Amino acid sequence: MPPDATLPMSEARIRAISGPVLHGLARGPFVVGEAIEVGNARLPGEVIRLDGDAFVAQVYEDTTGLKPGDPVRGTSAPLSVALGPGLPGRIYDGLLRRLDGGDAAARPCRGSPSCRRSARQRRLARRGDRRVRGAGPASLCMLPPGVGGTVVDIAPAGEVEADATLAVVRDDSGREHRIAPFHRWPVRRPRPVTQRLPADEPLVTGQRILDTLFPVARGGRAAIPGGFGTGKTVLQETLAKWCHADIIVYVGCGERGNEMAEVLDEFPRLVDPRNGRALMERTVIIANASNMPVAAREASIYTAVTVAEYFRDQGLHVALMADSTSRWAEALREVSGRLGELPGEAGYPAYLGSRLAEFYERAARVESLCGREGSLTIIGAVSPPGGDFSEPVTSHTKRYVGCFWGLDRERAQARFYPAIHPLQSYSVDASRFATWWTAHGNDNWQRQREKLLALLDEQAHLERMARIVGKDALPAGQQLTLIAADLVNEALLRQSAFSPVDRYCSPARQSEMLRLVMRFIALSREALARGMSPDEIASLPVLRRLQRMGEEVGEDAIASFAALWPQLERELAAPGAAVAETGDAR
Amino acid sequence: MHAELTTQGTATRIDGPLLFLERNVEVTLGEAVDVLIGDEPPRTGRVTSLDDDTIVIEVLETTRGLSLDALRVRFRGEPISMGVGPGLLGRIFNGIGQPVDGGPPVAAVSQRRVDAPAMNPARRALPRDFIETGVSAIDLTNSLIRGQKLPIFSSGGLPHDRLAIEIARHARLRDARAGEFAIVFVGIGVSYDSAEAFRRAMEDSGALGHTAMFLNLASEPSPQRLLAPRVALTAAEYLAFDEGRHVLVILTDMTNYCEALREVSASHGEIPSRKGYPGYMYSDLATIYERAGSTRGAAGTVTQLPILTMPADDISHPIPDLTGYITEGQIVLDRALDRRGVYPPINVLPSLSRLFDQGTGKGYTHADHPALAHQLFASYAKATRVRVLASVVGQEGLTASDRRYLAFADRFERELVAQEGARHLDESMAVGWRLLGDLPRGELSRLNDAQIARHVPSGPPSERADG
Ligand SMILES: Nc1ncnc2c1ncn2[C@@H]1O[C@H](COP(=O)(O)OP(=O)(O)O)[C@@H](O)[C@H]1O
Ligand SMILES: [Mg+2]
């Protein structure tokens, strides 16, 4: 439904103000959740609580300079954003106002969306055409959900202003709707879909540890918890660059301004390997840096997910990166504290869990109103204080996500990236992807995955033992297990985000690398049984080639993995066995 | 806003740093005030909340000696600001920006709000220029980039002051393209002695002329600590963006800042978050640290080197923890290294420079610099794990290769981290390559074959002259 247009505009004045929270006295009805304009500068705000004539509201900008008696105007609409063509490729603040206006201070263009945006529209509809509700971009533009019918008038093709009338649509009850390129949608209300579909295909991320061990579904949800400096942001940026999505919504929520600048600087120069276009063209950046107003931080997450749903509704695969959901939770806590609400665990309001649940619930694979399939995958970073995963935001998040990619301080300190700890991570989605991998050239993925996880588990166990008895005292078979696990870590799990060769790893390349490592493990077991010592195995030249193959064999050279097979067979072969016999035993 | 207004006889309550007035004048949120009593110097404060009947003022100095009847409040009609202009360098100011060196007031060309609006992320210039500090454990593995905010996490009794002074003295671009740094030193709740030591060190090296100092001494009121870094950064921004200088801001000790924040928050009756610190401490610290950097088109930059002491040496304490979440890395000093006589006692593993990959390598430093650093990290991390193992099972329980790592760990600390006098990056790199020569070559998986052939000395350590 479009925002309710039947409410009368109301007026009020400020009674008390402190930080971002104001108390007002209303003349006329206000609605909880209504967007308001505060003071003579018309700062944006939102009503949070009503009590008779009195109300409480939060203000989304710096409140310095406000005073009791200043006017407050209602807008008769809930906090909404304007959705339309031309959103990607730009940076916005938490209320979807453009930040690339050229002002050195983070002051958004005022009165958006009336800052001139125009959209090139192709004339694809004709008078008399039937348009269903929420029709997608291949028609004239998104009809807002809730509007559908017959096109009775349509503007000529060409450039139009953001608020121009593109068409008039008459619905079945005979009511006419003016259709503009943009329509407003309340950020806190999920956009409707025809139906939710099962999320049974993976969102390819190009990161081996994720795609191979902990894959996330298109329409799934994943969390990246980690202490400071463990690699949350770099991982989110890497996913934003290379994951197989049509649209990326990247929300920097309470994080560094420089990181936003970096995305703005880098993405236009990077090319999407799947279609040759600049990555920036598929990216919407929403920034509420840590030094920007805290109330807008709370809104920024909803703004981002609403923009993401808008593209999903057009039948696109969308991935939303939220860095960091903890800052959003802290913004909730701060406003809650100022409202004098009873604090729960660690000072967070009691509704923290349900807010997180609502947010992650907006991820889905769907059939949209226009009948197309789209998906929205949500990937949220979590910044636990002291890196302690038992704190409230991490533990609540854990209940709602299907993938948990836990970052480990020790790995990060050894500069082993991505520092995802395989034993502290999981993917519930993984069980559904065996068929997908079979269709993409690896019919053995599920077994390989299970073996790898078992091997890494065994490694942890053996390392604990070695700490008691010494590594030398472990039986040869167990020493070999440690060598194999080291190889899995070095060759498969480690992948530098900054390496032009290895930053993205296609499913085909992953499968090749996986097969080589599995073959090494099998052959080295046989060699050990024949009497080769673990030390001899550890110093085989092929081991170094395998460790470095991610760096040495790029996407355009997948065929040259084949060169490693004979070397592998030769160095681990039984004495006298001819290489040719085992050369293609894969 | 309005012109100056003064009110008397309206004060109803004084509670810690908070002063409550009846509201009979039109004032606005965030406005600066002077609290006057008798002919004492005015005390600075600001309006923190307002309702129909009441004005709440946070006094940024002591409220001792104030009486409800006698005090007068002058509203300045604008938020707290600082007058900036030529002639800031070479001067010493207190925490609210008044000269304390006996010199004349600064001829201000403009008044700037001390809590400047956030820098627009869309206008930021990415920091890229490598700064050579002369410290191997920084230059080689955790490099400082112009426009970065890189704190030193220290602990009581460790030589962080000495390290900061040395960095301030040596910091330069590798190719001396641009002039030297201007230094802004911000003492927050520091002792007179350490402020004086810094001043003397700058004087000795002839750098006092391009240094401005802002001092909030330990003996001065703690609420003023909230102001000192903001006043100093306002000056630094003027030097950087109006005068086009590269400014290195040293803030010490941010722990004192956070203590003051906790104190003031408690007096407001706010619900505390972890360890009694306010829930908004993250956002509050961000308004200081995020003032590092530069905008596109600006000639100058602001680089921050905040120093903090970790309470109980605990890196997960809210002060270092929240700082680490905001800053672009951290340099961690370590008591065990200090005890072993390693200076500077930088623990390389938990240290991090997030801008390392952005400001090193081809076109910035040396093409093989990043690979060398990553290999040193990987090897040293493994070596410290072996060291833990050895402390449990003894050297006998180690494999031959593990024993080489054990020796590497010691040499890494004694020969690379420890140093006397400044080193050029090339010298630091040479030490790094030499140390890697002691390790099994097959395990140098972060280096490619060509890098090994080019730089890593061959042969087992015992057969080499330097071994
Ligand atoms: N996948 C990666 N590849 C290479 N370097 C990484 C990777 N992840 C993290 N890093 C390094 O670690 C640093 C910190 O990562 P970052 O994502 O900023 O941490 P967080 O967001 O968790 O605080 C980065 O500046 C980068 O140097
Ligand atoms: Mg981050």
Image (spheres, coloured by chain):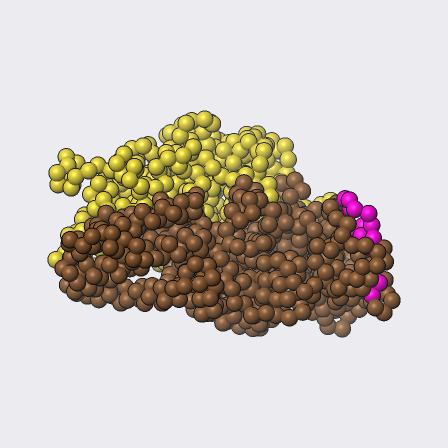
Chain colours: A brown, B yellow
Q: Where in the figure is residue B205, as x and y percent of width and height?
A: 38, 29
Q: Nearer the viewer, residue A157 or A205?
A: A157
- Residue B324 locus on image (x, y percent): 44, 52
Total marks placed: 0
Q: Quadrant of residue B421?
A: top left
Q: Residue at x 78, y 64 (%)?
A: A148
Q: Residue furthest right?
A: A174
Q: Is residue A255 magenta?
A: no
**In the rendered image, the vertical position of residue B271 relative to residue A412, given as above or below:** below
Q: Residue at left 39%, top 56%?
A: A511
| Residue depicted at 24% across the width and 55% down the height | A581
| Start-end of magenta stretch | A154-171
Figure check: B280 above or below B308: below
Q: Residue at x 43, y 32 (%)?
A: B363
Q: Nearer the viewer, residue B348 or A219?
A: A219
Relative to B330, is B33 on the left or the right? Answer: right
